[in-house]
Image (cartoon, grey):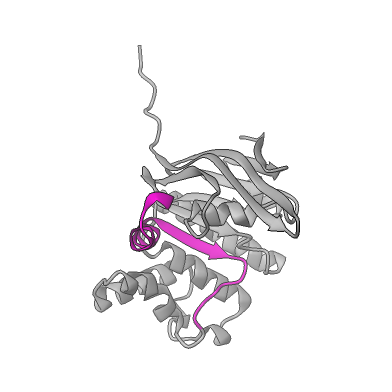
Amino acid sequence: MTEGKPSPPVVLAAHAVCRSFREGSSTLEVLRDVELSVAAGERLAIIGVSGSGKTTLLQILGGLDRPDRGSVQVLEQDIHALSETERGALRNRAIGFVYQFHHLLPEFSALENVAMPLLVRRERTPVAIARARDILTRVGLAERLTHRPSQLSGGERQRTAVARALVSSPSLVLADEPTGNLDGRNASQVFELMLELNRELGTSLVVVTHDSRLAARMDRVLELSSGALLQLASP
């Protein structure tokens, strides 16, 4: 009798996550006992109407916001039980972020922007620059290394942002509408790039998106509705 393949390790796990916001005299419950588990290398899409709490959930998963109740584990560490310094170190080592707007530093070149996460963790400058150059080459920007964000097209800026998120080979990438600010052609190129790097590096992807075509390419699709995550489809 042949044994089945072992399950991949869990990279991200959220348990009973709740988050509310005060609106005048009332309370808006955005997340209600959210449960989520993401395996190594898995690709997950989260969809939902505007204002449903998708960005809030992503920020809590990445340790940028705190839940009112519940826990989030990244690589088996409770990210919200860590000190601010420890939490920042875990984010820098294990999590990459991609946003709808690239958030590149305007005064630095593409190469310097991508090297920044490595420099923040005190990596030697020649090593950081070499890694940044390598991944920018892999995303098709070898000829644009010295260009500042203002000198790059929208698609090039977003590819630079993807390179920055992946330069440290994180276990997890959290992406909030990563193609939402791009035209159809550039959106397709950026998303194909993310899938390619997911396959090559084994990085887990959690992507918030309104793009149904993008969501359909993921391993799982969850909808955030009335504060809860509901599974809609799987391959």
Q: Nearer the viewer, residue 95 or 68?
A: 68
Q: How many marks?
A: 0
Outermost front residue = 25
Q: Nearer the viewer, residue 220 or 90?
A: 90
Where on the picture, by quarter, is residue 87?
A: bottom left
Q: Residue at 39% across / 22% down in the picture?
A: 4
Describe residue 212's horizontal placement relative to residue 120 as left or right: right
Q: Residue at 60% across / 80% down in the picture?
A: 153
Outermost top residue = 1
Image quarter hosting the N terminus: top left
- Percent across and percent down for residue 78 are 39, 46
Q: Residue at 34% across / 61% down in the picture?
A: 89
User: Magenta segment: does it hold 194?
Assistant: no
- Percent across and percent down for residue 185 are 68, 66
- Percent across and percent down for residue 199 are 45, 49
Which segment is the magenta one? Answer: 80-105
User: Magenta segment: does it hold 83?
Assistant: yes
Describe residue 145's horizontal placement relative to residue 35 as left or right: left
With respect to residue 72, does 169 lie above or below? below
Where on the picture, by quarter, is residue 158?
A: bottom right
- Percent across and percent down for residue 204 are 46, 48
Q: Nearer the viewer, residue 130 or 118?
A: 118
Image quarter hosting the C terminus: top right
Describe residue 221's horizontal placement relative to residue 116 as left or right: right
Q: Residue at 56% across / 87% down in the picture?
A: 151
With respect to residue 35, does 83 lie above or below? below
With respect to residue 173, does 41 lie above or below? above
